[in-house]
Image (tube, rainbow, N blue to C red):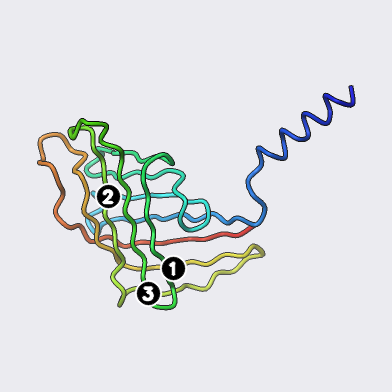
Amino acid sequence: MHFILVAILTAFLFASPAPGVGHAKLYCISQSGRTLFEAEFEGFTTLEKAKLTIDKNSMPFFYSDKCYVTFDSEVNVYTLSVESEDNGNFDTVRYVKFWAVPSSFHEVSSQGTEFRNIYKFNAKLKAIDPRKGKGFETRIILLSCTLTYTNP
């Protein structure tokens, strides 16, 4: 009985997220409301999931996709590149290239009991177009974004 209890507790501890690791959510929308980009990260850089939606046509991204983030709030830099594996079939490739407009980047103070940083900025996005028949790549799309980082 003791062995089973120890095994269950050990499994629970290893399945729990790392203590002290924060969670970031990125939410961006175009002025027209037709384009939406959402992403969630462990910390600031490890992608959990993301989704680009244009005219209600969505393209998902997952933790297994390649993700590169550069973030430095002191110099107003935030860039994001997410791409899937092509696996020899370029018709299934998905990618998003995303960068903040530095002059628009600012931190917003937040209230509450948990540790939280909120950043607002404009960003430019270029991606594979998720809409059928619209061509391979989107034009550069300007988005208004909120990046929220919460640390437990």
Q: Position of residue 64 (x, y in %)?
A: 41, 39
Residue at screen point 26% across, 52% down? 33
As drawn, is 24 to the left or to the right of 4? left
- On the image, which quarter does residue 113 sit in? bottom right
Residue at screen point 83% across, 31% down? 6
As drawn, is 45 to the left or to the right of 22? left
Image disc number at residue 71:
none
Q: Which mark is first along the chain, 3 or 2?
A: 3
Q: CA distance from mark 2 to mark 1?
A: 20 Å
Query: Which secondary structure, mark 3?
Result: loop
Task: Say few, some or many: other residues with alpha carbon within 10 Å of mark 2 (under 14 / 14 to 19 / 20 or more).
Answer: many
Query: Which secondary structure, mark 2?
Result: strand
| Kind of residue sitting beneath label 3 | Asn
**Nearer the camera: disc 1 or disc 3:** 3
Q: Position of residue 16 (x, y in %)?
A: 66, 42
| Kind of residue sitting beneath label 2 | Val
Task: Say few, some or many: other residues with alpha carbon within 10 Å of mark 1 (under 14 / 14 to 19 / 20 or more).
Answer: some
**Nearer the camera: disc 2 or disc 1:** 2
Q: Which mark is first along the chain, 1 or 2?
A: 2
| Kind of residue sitting beneath label 1 | Tyr
Q: Quadrant of the N terminus?
A: top right
User: Looking at the picture, does residue 145 appear above or below residue 72?
Assistant: above
Q: CA distance from mark 1 to mark 3?
A: 10 Å
Identify residue for label 2.
Answer: 96
As drawn, is 121 to the left or to the right of 44? left
Identify residue for label 3.
Answer: 76
Identify residue for label 1.
Answer: 119
Q: CA distance from mark 2 to mark 3?
A: 20 Å
